[in-house]
Amino acid sequence: MANSGVLNRRILSYIEETDTTEEIRDFLKWALGFELEQAWESNLQFRKEYERSIVAATKKSGSH
Amino acid sequence: MWIEHISLKNYRQYQDEKIEFAGPTEGKNLTVIQGDNGSGKTNLVNAVTWCLYGNERHLTAKNKGLDIYNTLAPKNLKPGDKLQVCVEVQLRENDGGKIIATRYLNYRLEPGGKVVKIPDHRSKSDDQSTLEMMRKIGRDMKEVEDPEFIIQKLIPEQIEEYFLFDGERLDEYFKEKSGIRIAEAVFKISQIELLESTIEHLKAMKQDFVKDRNDLSPHVEEIQGKIDALTKTLTELDDRRKKAEGQRDEAERLEMEARGRLSEAPVQNVGKLEDERTELEGEIVKAKAELEELKRERVEYLVATAPMVFAIPCIKESMELIGQSEAAGRFPPEYEPGFVNKLLKNERCICGRDLKKGSTDYEQVKSLLTKASALGGLTKRLVTNAGNLESSLQKVRELSEIVTKQNGRIQNLDKRTETMEKRKSTIDSLISGCDSEKIRQFEAEVQEYLKKKTQLSEEVGKLKLMVRSTESRITEMEKERNKELRNQTKYRELVANLDFCEDALAVATGAKEKVMEDVRREIEQQTREHFLNMIWKEKTYANVEIGDDYNVSVKHVSGCESIGTLSAGERQVLALSFVAALNNVSGFDAPLIIDTPLGRISSEPRTRIAKALPSCFPNRQVILLMTDEEYTPMVRDALKDHVSKEFSIKFTEYKDGSDAKVIENA
């Protein structure tokens, strides 16, 4: 998961301890890293990246 | 992580300096760099921010607009020579890793003595400077491809101001709109803004998924229902077709059987033959009646014409006599008695003479009228009779032809009747002795089965068409259903994505609320501890609170709010306490460089603050840049147990520039 190392340990810790799925934890860590890098330059781009990541996570969780 | 060394080459007042720091050890985490105002302390902070971010964040008004290179450096250059400004910061990670960040900016001395910047196409900074980085990976130092990315990982630029800052400016936090500023600081450093951004983006994605889901409306079940109904219809039609085909085949079989029975009969088509015979009988009767009529007509004709045949000599003689008499003018003149009577009545002759009654002429005409009356009409009758005689002769002349024709018609009819009688006789001989009724029954059966077979064949044809049409409709519906199935798959995926989005949103929102509250509470607690530990008015202040709106409140022992009455020094202590809390709560393990940490603090409280300062930043490298006024002997004494290294800046000003040396104190 990109950049998880620089994310606030407190946030990461909360995410890790929350009763949720591994896919959601991984996704949120990815999303926070994505926001941290401000890797999106346009709404289109963030939508594309978010959608890609959500779809991948949902598939991984076997919900599809 | 701590700064191992900072190297400066031709950077502002530093021509060529390298400052080597000691790593923070238990209880010894401070480095003091002492220098007069304007000697270059703040530019050390600038050097670090420039190296890491390509930006000098704390430029004084004096330095703004001045070139970054040391103005003494070009003195030793020849035109065309390159002048490089370079700052290198070597960082040591707690796990032993090493990172060397080097930023440089190249200039060239022009012949006229002007120093111009040399653009670097690799630069990502506005000032054309370039950052390079080497990182220890395993045993080797390797160049990092994207150094800006690594810096962003280590100390994100957004929160750099909470690690590399000017102490004198700290109190600005608590001047105006402190709640907003503090909330902003907390949000930034605790990365709540990242959570906020994640939440906003998740909400946007959720809306997208909802819209996409609503755009899809799967009708698979409805279409499948239609397909099932059509399939049922198809089955029924096919059953009917098969049944009709079976019935047709059965009809054909029965027809063949009937034909078989018929073929075994001695005479074929007995029914037809009988019908023909019946018809022949009728025809023969009619022909005979007609024949009788013709013969009767011939007799009548001969009877009517025969007298004339015998009278031909007399007719011819009479006609000759009439002709001769007419030719001889022996026919009396023809006149009209009416016309003559009219002349007598009018007493005027046609010639114009008077026929006066009683006159001789009148009497003579009257006498002639009387004489002529006896022969009147004779000539006319003679002429008429001559015509009749001629007509009789003509009839006699036509006799032979007419009789021949009549004889021909009679002969033809005779012959036809004979033929028909012969055919009737043949049929009679054919069907005599056979069971014509049975044969006719066979024939009827054949016709019945044939008719039935034909009807069933037509029905089979119609059913086949209906089956094909239904199959075609089913194929179309199946295509539509498959399309809808794909939509349904997409629909399910969208619903799954949406559920995932909502779950992630719930976790992110929960994280935000929890982290905000935890961070606020911890910062409040640490700020309170640091403040009450450092503040010299021990009996004045009782508490520091940070509200839900992040407004900081300093409570007087009496319970009154005191934030508005804090002195600049007290505000700086509060700010220092807050920044210390913020740093410790942030979770980022980054070194601190504080410029003039005690700048606004009066002499007495400095010692107290100095004593408390190390505990504000435990186990973290803190580089303090202090003036002589700050770094008093008492402060030095208060800090000595925690200072690992101590430096002094020796600043020398020349006519064309300045030079600063950082010398480690013995």
Image (cartoon, coloured by chain):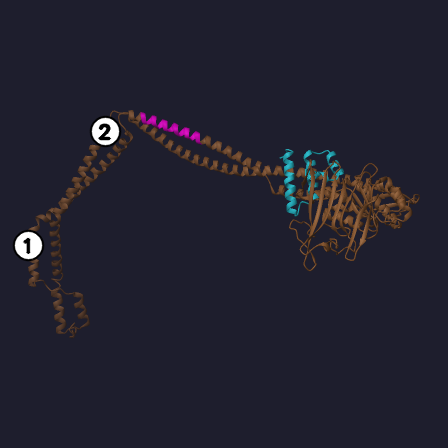
Chain letter tied to cyan: A
Residue contact between numbered discs 2 and 1, judged by CB atoms under 8 Å: no
Left or right for B253, reference B561: left
- Quarter of the rendering occupied by the N terminus of chain A: top right
Whole-percent x, y for residue A18 in the image: 74, 34
Q: Nearer the viewer, mark 2 or mark 1?
A: 2
Question: What percent of the width, then of the height, locates residue B580?
Answer: 82, 43
**Image coordinates for residue B358, horizontal then vertical, percent:** 15, 73
Crowding around mark 2 (Cα neighbors within 10 Å: few <14, some 14 to 19, many 20+) is some
**Label 1 element class:** helix
Q: Please check the rendered image and state whether residue B257 is part of the magenta-colored stretch, yes or no.
A: yes
The span shown in magenta is B241-260
What amino acid does circle 2 point to?
A: Asp
The numbered disc on residue B317 is 1
Position in image of residue B253 (x %, y %): 36, 27
Residue topped by disc 2: B428
- Label 1 Cα crowd, 10 Å radius (few <14 / some 14-19 / many 20+): few
Q: Colour of chain B?
A: brown
Q: Is residue B539 visible?
A: yes
Looking at the picture, does residue B51 appear above or below residue B518? below
Please state which amino acid type lies under the numbered disc 1. Answer: Glu
Q: Chain of mark 2?
A: B
| Residue B87 located left or right of residue B639 | left
Q: Main secondary structure of the magenta part?
A: helix
Q: CA distance from mark 2 to mark 1?
A: 63 Å
Viewer can see residue B555: no
* Foreground pick, B301 / B48: B48
Q: Quadrant of residue B220?
A: top right
Q: Are marks 2 and 1 on the same chain?
A: yes
